[in-house]
Amino acid sequence: MTNSTLSDRRGIRLGYRANLVGLSALGVIFLWVVVALFAPHMIPHSVGEIVDTDYFGPMSRDLWFGSDYLGRDIFSRILMGARYTLGISLAAVSIACFAGVALGMTAAVAGGWLDTLLSRFLDALNSIPSKLFGLVVVAAVGSSIPALIGTLAVIYIPGAYRFARALSVNVNTMDFMVVARIRGERLPYLIASEILPNILGPVLADLGLRFVFIVLLLSGLSFLGLGVQPPYADWGALVRENIGGLPFGAPAVILPSLAIASLTISVNLLIDNLPTRIRDRSVE
Amino acid sequence: MRKQVSSLVIRRLLIALITLVIVSFAVFFATALLPGDTATILLGQSATPEAIEGLRNAMHLNDPAILRFLRWIGGLFRGDFGTSYANNVPIADLIRGRFANTMKLAGLTAAVSVPLALTLGITAAIWRGTLYDRFVTVATIGIISVPEFMIATLAVLLFAVYLRWLPALSLTNEIKSFHDLLRVYAMPVVTLTFGVSAQMIRMTRAAVVETLNTPYVEMALLKGASRSRLVLKHALPNALGPIVNSVALSLSYLLGGVIIVETIFNYPGIAKLMVDAVSTRDLPLIQTCAMIFCVGYLFLITAADIIAVLSNPRLR
């Protein structure tokens, strides 16, 4: 039943007027996803190989984006960095939104003390600044990649919870919910088949926004040297290791940050240009 | 009616207090998760088991976690923040000067960004839909979507590398004149201002646009009030509550921003201290710094909520 409503909706969505800004943003995101998937086959030089005798070399025909502080090819390193930035953020945002939305719907449908307790607790977690939260947890559990994914997910669960709960509370007052309750449906059914299809659009848009937050936080942590650790490097770590090139205006410092910006701005633009009926359809 | 307001405010303060307790719990136990035994770390690998056991007892490390938590909280209330593991200095001494530095940076940023953001936000709302409004909106979205360190590196590149107007590092002990002050603080303040203002402009614009859409503003328009009168006399007084609310919320963004900005400009503030403490795994220092930040953040968001309640004329 869920499947059929979903595919119906998707059919309608294709009928929306395409927006040029939204489409180009989608194009950039798609490009980075392809890069992240196929980076090992696309890089012109190995990421560890020193190919330039000079460090912080300029852009040239052979080294498109110049070389880094050891003379490695920065173009290849950015392509490979996409895997870490996109992969870790995507994993974290999926966990955060899955957990947050599931808890939010449960709290809204169950109500009572469960709702109060969950809301109080998660609101409290929400009032720790995210970067600080990241610092404290990374200090405690270290910065291996699974630990990073877990940390980022935990930091953004409260936000996803709050958003999903607010939407679900609205849906919960609808007549079809009363009918379903009278039919004797249980909590898992109510959540999966009655609430979820009605909040899916806004929840997906929210997932996109949260993805941007996570990319920014991950890059920030890596920039501070507390995120992805060598020999691996995401885009934030690339900026950090090449920060010494700043006085020379080396492309090795600027281009990784531009890569982050291109991804985050694209996601924001895509969400801003989604048809409003997908984005804001809280109750239909 | 007045009773209702005070009960709402008291309720909000109570919630803040409960939140603070949960937050301090979270901070304490997150740091208690740290693998490795503190006593072993302090004494080094070659210490005898007896020495480690002795130190563990002296530091109350063998007590249950909840006891250590209560002792820690009690210490915070008495102003006893404990001793730094890394260099055995009382944390209060480490923090004093740096706290003042961070507050200076935050205060200067607020002094620059609040007037700037309010002007841009309100004017963008008045001339909504024009090219100017579009430009402001796109610029703020752009700034919000990029990491702070990118704004900082671009600022260094522009002002210190290409234009050579400003130094790239902050050395606060070399301030001798107003000119020096300007040079030292300019970069960090500019970087922070970008981030804080972008948030504030967006929220201010939204608040004013919402007020301008109300029927009584339309009424004022129909009766022939001039545009400036419309905005200044009719819309702005009612948008004031939401605007002040958004100012307080945006300032809480400062707390995240200073972490990056103090590190990149090597500014001797609390956030830099904390980042260093994380790399040396100096637990008591991390806990204290984290609590300072959380209290600051909680204070700002609670203030924002209370202002929102107080500014609602229906409750007054």
Image (cartoon, grey):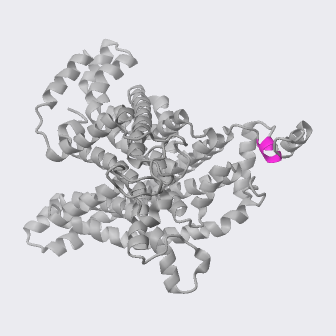
Q: Is residue A207 visible?
A: yes
Q: Is residue B313 visible?
A: no
Question: Where residue A138 appears, x then y in whole percent?
Answer: 58, 43
Question: Where residue A171 appears, x then y in whole percent?
Answer: 29, 30
Give the prevailing secondary structure in the magenta stretch. Answer: helix
Residue positioned 38% across, 46% down in the render = A75
Outermost residue toward the bottom?
B177
A237 over B132 or under it: above or below: above
Looking at the picture, tell me which residue is in the foreground, B188 or B25. Answer: B188
Residue positioned 59% across, 60% down in the render = B272
How many numbered marks are there?
A: 0
Residue positioned 41% across, 39% down in the render = A80
Q: Is residue B41 magenta?
A: yes
Looking at the picture, tell me which residue is in the foreground, B167 or A15. Answer: B167
Q: Quadrant of the C terminus of chain B?
A: bottom left
A87 over A214 or under it: above or below: above
- Relative to residue A259, is residue B229 drawn left or right? left
Outermost residue toward the front?
A53
Looking at the picture, tell me which residue is in the foreground, A23 or A251. Answer: A251
Start-end of magenta stretch: B38-43
Q: Specify the quadrant of the image occupied by residue B170.
A: bottom right
Residue positioned 70% across, 55% down in the render = B76
- Relative to residue B4, is residue B289 drawn left or right? right
Q: Is residue A80 magenta?
A: no
Question: Where residue A51 appears, x then y in whole percent?
Answer: 45, 47
A38 over A21 or under it: above or below: above
- Relative to residue A277, is residue B141 drawn left or right? right
Q: Quadrant of the N terminus of chain B?
A: bottom left
- Relative to residue A261, is residue A23 drawn left or right? left
Outermost residue toward the right?
B50
